[in-house]
Image (cartoon, rainbow, N blue to C red):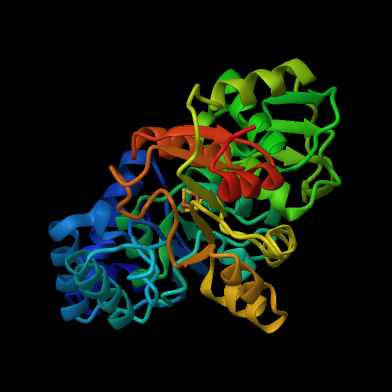
Amino acid sequence: MHLTSVEEKMLAGEDGYAVQKNMQILTALGDIFGADKMIPVSSVQVAGVSYYNLGDAGLEYLHGLADKGAKARVKTTLNPAGMDLENWRELGIDEHFALKQEQLIQAFVKMEITASCTCTPYLVGNEPGRGDHIAWSESSAVTYANSILGAMTNREGGPSALAAAITGRTPSYGMHLEENRKPQVRVKIETKLGAVPDFGALGYTVGKKIGPKIPLFEGIDTAPVEQLKSLCASIATYGGTALFHKHDTSYRQVETPGETLTITRADIEGALRALNDEAAGVDFVALGCPHCTLAEIKKIADLLEGKRVTKEFWICTARQTMKEAEKNGDAQKIRAAGAKFACDTCMAVAPLKGRFRVLATDSAKACYYGRGTNDFKTHIGSVEECVNAAVTGKWT
Ligand code: F3S
């Protein structure tokens, strides 16, 4: 791989041990994937932040880097952590876990990484532009960045994203090359899609049918951010897709592929059935996968007004978004009903195994992790159905 003289010096250790080690990681990665050079990145998003996933080995690795002087050279934010960094007690997190999670966050902060702890960095100030080369690692955000924002990123692992932050570089391969970003399957949607669960079901269906091939969607051009982030999360989870095209956001003219997949109402209904388990009752309701927008919080607040929840109900969102909701009074309505904000974290990366039995959510991705990571039974439905489940404890 060709390295510039600046990069050669980084690799030789002239910028210190931490830069050298991370340049070694990136050159090794570049060699594996046949990259011919490094490219500068303007934004990094690091996943692998929860102590639930990282454990003591991860904690030791991160503090080792921080103690050796590693610093982020470009705007870098974090994916959700294992707990709400302020209200962890209210969410039932134990002291030992909280202490370890705080130590992990301290290591990132020492490396001058912003502890925004969200999977929707594009909603809270880390929003790259079209054609920008970036290194993000949260799968839903990667798909959103490539497909909706028009930025260019591979789906990084936590360590390679961190290495990109510390060096300001990433190897040039995969999604950084135009020739790898062409649509491969035309997806004709022959049904009217409704709210968020329909878009999760679309991602589930298309992901299962075409895997990581790049789709060109016809029929979702007017979908708002809430539906699109749900689609990104779902298609990345069930198909491994890092990029899709839709007509109005394709910043380059793309050719329509010959292979065609048609999606009907029967496909959407089938996906929703597959994500709904046979399970009586609900004991945990979680919305915000990916993290809620302000508009989603407003809707939840309006639905909860004058009601009282009887089951644990988490609204997962970025702390910055929750603070906005406090300004307009929606956060107060939600808390008055007994529901809880889960800022900085989510239902998949918090230590929840064994605490609950049946999850109700509007997110296809949350169903995947609820089942896989936490052994929950799952119900997927509209926000209205989820709020009703939190109030009644029943799924209707
Ligand atoms: Fe975000 Fe957690 Fe879902 S990281 S996309 S809320 S599984």
What quarter of the picture does the C terminus occupy? Answer: top right
Of the pair 308 and 191, the residue shown nearer to us: 308
Residue 184 located left or right of residue 55 = right
- The residue positioned 72% from the left and 57% from the top of the image is 303
Residue 216 location, x and y as percent?
74, 32
Residue 14 location, x and y as percent?
22, 79
- The residue positioned 70% from the left and 21% from the top of the image is 269
Decide if residue 262 is in sight here.
no
Residue 41 location, x and y as percent?
50, 66
- The residue positioned 48% from the left and 26% from the top of the image is 279
Query: Which quarter of the figure has residue 131?
Result: bottom right
Residue 336, compared with residue 187, is above or below; it is below
Decide if residue 374 is in sight here.
yes
Query: Which quarter of the figure has residue 149?
Result: bottom right
- The residue positioned 67% from the left and 26% from the top of the image is 184
Residue 158, compared with residue 173, is above or below; it is below
Query: Which quarter of the figure has residue 386?
Result: top right
Residue 274 location, x and y as percent?
56, 21
Of the pair 384 and 153, the residue shown nearer to us: 384
